[in-house]
Amino acid sequence: MKISIPELKPLLKEIAEVAYNVWAHGWAERNAGNISMNVTPHIRTMDYISDKKQEQHRLPFLFPNLSEQILLMSATGSRMRELAEFPHKYMMLLRISSDGDSYSIIPLANHSFHLQPSSELLAHLAIHQQLIEEDSLNNTLLHTHITEVIALNHFPNLNEKNALNKVLLSMHPETILFLPEGAGFVPFLPPGSQELARKTLDEIKHHSVVIWEKHGVLSYGTSPANACDQLELIAKAARIYLMCRQASVSPSGLSIQQLRQLKEKNDLPPHLPFTS
């Protein structure tokens, strides 16, 4: 039996569509990937507070900006292909305490009381806190294992930020138009670790997409679909590069002059997020 919160229905539908898209791309093997959305403006207190006191789960850091915020988040161990079919079974609401030091879990289905939030919980919370700090309209985070980007990280000359951005932004005009600041980059750190959350937060202040070396990519957006758009831009650029290399061609890419011309024509700052 589902817990009925009508305001969540269209959001869950969009998340399900994005989850299917991610799985169809091959970016979500087994239980890979996770998604969260700040839904505080969409629901009222009476919708998620039950008569029974919810168990509080202590957090290792304070998240004061998230005080009393409500996040819709995928469960750890959930598969994107399952989430696409039954989002209410594999998503949950997290209610952050008034002190920002703990959270309670509100399941969306009666049989889902055993679910726990994504293993990347700390990274999600840190970024949602930063987005609130910036008074940003962005409310959704999406992390997937983009095959093509992970493959690029195994090229010895493409496992650092400057080189990656030089390649990715020059493969296709759309990339620099919609990601003019390029992609952030975090050298490999254990998934789910506090250090990964901290390093990601440093990068997300300047980039809407962050590459985790040999692990995957995380993006934020104004909706689940918008966050997925960002990932598709990066994936397309990486795929073009790999296809050229597979054909024994060293891709020339768009020139510095062409990239600056694109930015100028679209009223974007002329600075390029890499050195030539």
Image (cartoon, rainbow, N blue to C red):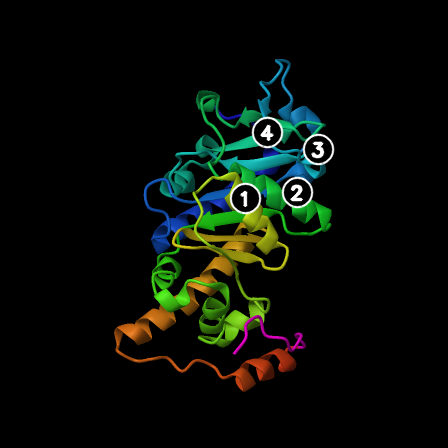
Q: Which residue is mark 3?
A: 67
Q: CA distance from mark 1 to mark 3?
A: 19 Å
Q: Earlier in the sequence, mark 1 or mark 4?
A: 4
Which element carries disc 3, helix, strand or loop? loop
Side of 96 relative to 118 (left or right): right
Q: Residue furthest top?
A: 52
Q: Earlier in the sequence, mark 2 or mark 4?
A: 4
Q: Position of residue 25 (x, y in %)?
A: 36, 55
Residue type at the position of mark 3:
Ser
Q: Quadrant of residue 71?
A: top right
Q: CA distance from mark 2 to mark 4?
A: 14 Å
* Mark 2 vs 4: CB contact within 8 A: no
* Mark 3 vs 2: CB contact within 8 A: no
Between residues 112 and 150, which one lies in front from this camera angle? Answer: 150
Q: Is residue 56 above or below residue 201?
A: above
Q: Position of residue 192 (x, y in %)?
A: 47, 39
Q: CA distance from mark 1 to mark 4?
A: 13 Å
- Of badges 1 and 2, the one in the foreground is 1
- The label on residue 129 is 2
Residue type at the position of mark 1:
Ala
Q: Earlier in the sequence, mark 4 or mark 3?
A: 4
Q: CA distance from mark 1 to mark 2?
A: 12 Å
Q: Which residue is mark 4?
A: 59
- The label on residue 197 is 1
Residue type at the position of mark 4:
Leu
The span picked out in magenta is 267-276
